[in-house]
Image (cartoon, helix red, strand yellow):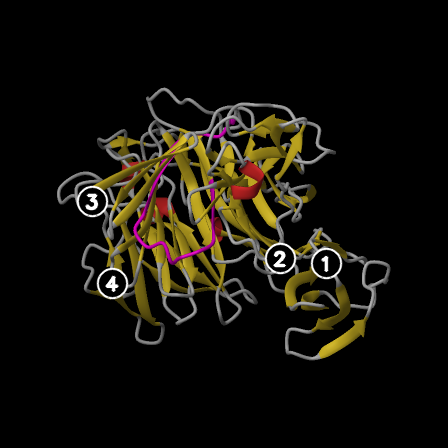
Amino acid sequence: MYLFYYKSLRTFCLLILIKFSVCNSLIGQNYPSFTATIYDSLSSGYYFLGPLPLGTGTPINSPTQMIIDHNANVVYYKTVGSAINIGDFKIQEANGLISYSTANKFRLMDSTFTIIDSVRCKAGIIPDDHDMQVLPNGHFLLIGYENVTMDLSSYNLFSGTSAPGSTTATVRFGVIQEQDANKNIVFEWHSKDYFTFSEMDTKWLSSPTFVDFTHFNAVELDQDGNLLVSSRHLNEITKINRTTGSVMWRLGGNANQFTFTNDSEMFKAQHDIRRIANGNITLFDNGEPGTPFHPATAKEYQLDETNLTATLVWSYVNNPSIYSTAMGNMQRHANGNTLINYGWYRGSNTLFTVVNPAGAKVFELSFPDSLRSYRSFFYPELPFGLIRPTITCTEISGQFYLDAGAGYSSYKWSNGATTQMIPVTTVGSFAVFVPMGTGGYISSENYVVSNSLSPCASTAIEESSKEIVSVFPNPIVDRINLKGINNIINYEIISSIGQTIWSGNEVENVDFKFLLPGVYILKLGSTKNLHFVKFIKQ
């Protein structure tokens, strides 16, 4: 039995008790339209993605950063010109900042989506947009590359035949660079000193004059303080000693040292190596065409690093007949769910799927054209409060209006209007986007009008109407600013180990320079209830 329900300018297709599909496309917004299928409405949180056009299709949108909530409502978006890469749009857990890559640089934004910092490889290392991690000590972990001239005439492996390489070939080798909080280099690792040319997968040897040898696409701080790096063109994950630079082991590819269990074909052209909480590693296996065919697969391995065994303990294949040409990632969530972003998924418009531990789908999102996202992420909660416009209803001379509030330079309503106030002429769900941060737009909650003759009396906020308190910007430097407070009578700041380290009856005029960098909880007591707000001190 199907039930179709039309709501404002969004079409909701509900298959009772099984799934809930949202076809999202609002008038006046520049973000790309998409279809989300919600199989489990109990999961809440936010999806971060950066769709960009690839392939031979006709894209209808420029590269765009997007945050989408669990109900498939767009919370934030930012169109990023014609830049080819806006990859790795995510939250850095170490400091709560939002980061993304573009134009050979990683930019960092605060909770107001304002760019406050940037970082890139330096000292002659060519920057790479694939990955950047902020470490718990505030350092930056980056990947880059260097070009080396080599004589490859003894390697008869090129152009799909036995053609020799050039005597003066340019070979691109990956480099890992760690910078401290002041952008000083404290560690650097050069793959050219540890890898040999014969270890490369020959399918990437199309040109005898230029070779992208390692093609690093992910770097990870391991739980023991050492490093993991993914070399796509070697089909290899390498563990590197962060003190000596020595190679501790090599997993996959021609130089593989491990015995694989339950996975005789290992992985091909992989992305996104991560060490997860249970000690296992995860990666997105892009796969490849050919015989035998290797489909795109999300994989979790249990490693024995002493006896060098790799046991495949969990995997997910969305379609056994499709591989992924490029990009992609896999993210394990605290509740056991897994997000699989398929990258350049050949033959399917599905961008990502979220599945539970048993492999049942929880959420799925797709675009109607050639848009793909390098990576996608899910966060059950944000480390900061979102500063969103609030829609109110008012009556003027017998006419009802929805008011987005003054003070914004522009307004983009879901019905196409561009004014601060819009007249209520019909029932439906309404939202408004206003400028936020450096070039982005943030939305209000959806405001539902169920009776156009008496909208102010019958309207309701679609999301929870509970009082929401937020700190901004987040992280703080020395001052705490609050949004959404009513009748607060006392405040406490609690450390990450549960110790109350400050209390008072006023917070916004207090200088908090004395707080050490870290994560804190602000406890606010009002005349009605308590509020707890997480914030970060830089």
- Rendered image: mark on residue 319: 3
Residue to which mark 4 is pinned: 358
Q: Nearer the viewer, mark 3 or mark 1?
A: 1
Mark 4 vs 3, N-terminal side:
3
Mark 2 vs 4, N-terminal side:
4
SS class of the residue under badge 3? loop
What segment is highlighted magenta in the picture? 29-49
Identified by mark 4, the residue type is Ala
The reply to whether discs 2 and 1 touch (Cβ–Cβ < 8 Å) is yes
Q: Nearer the viewer, mark 2 or mark 4?
A: 2
The quarter holding residue 21 reads: top left
Taking the image as drawn, is residue 118 in sight?
yes
SS class of the residue under badge 2? loop
Identified by mark 1, the residue type is Asn
Using the numbered discs, state the Cα–Cα distance from disc 2 to disc 4 in whole angstroms.
36 Å
The reply to whether discs 3 and 2 touch (Cβ–Cβ < 8 Å) is no
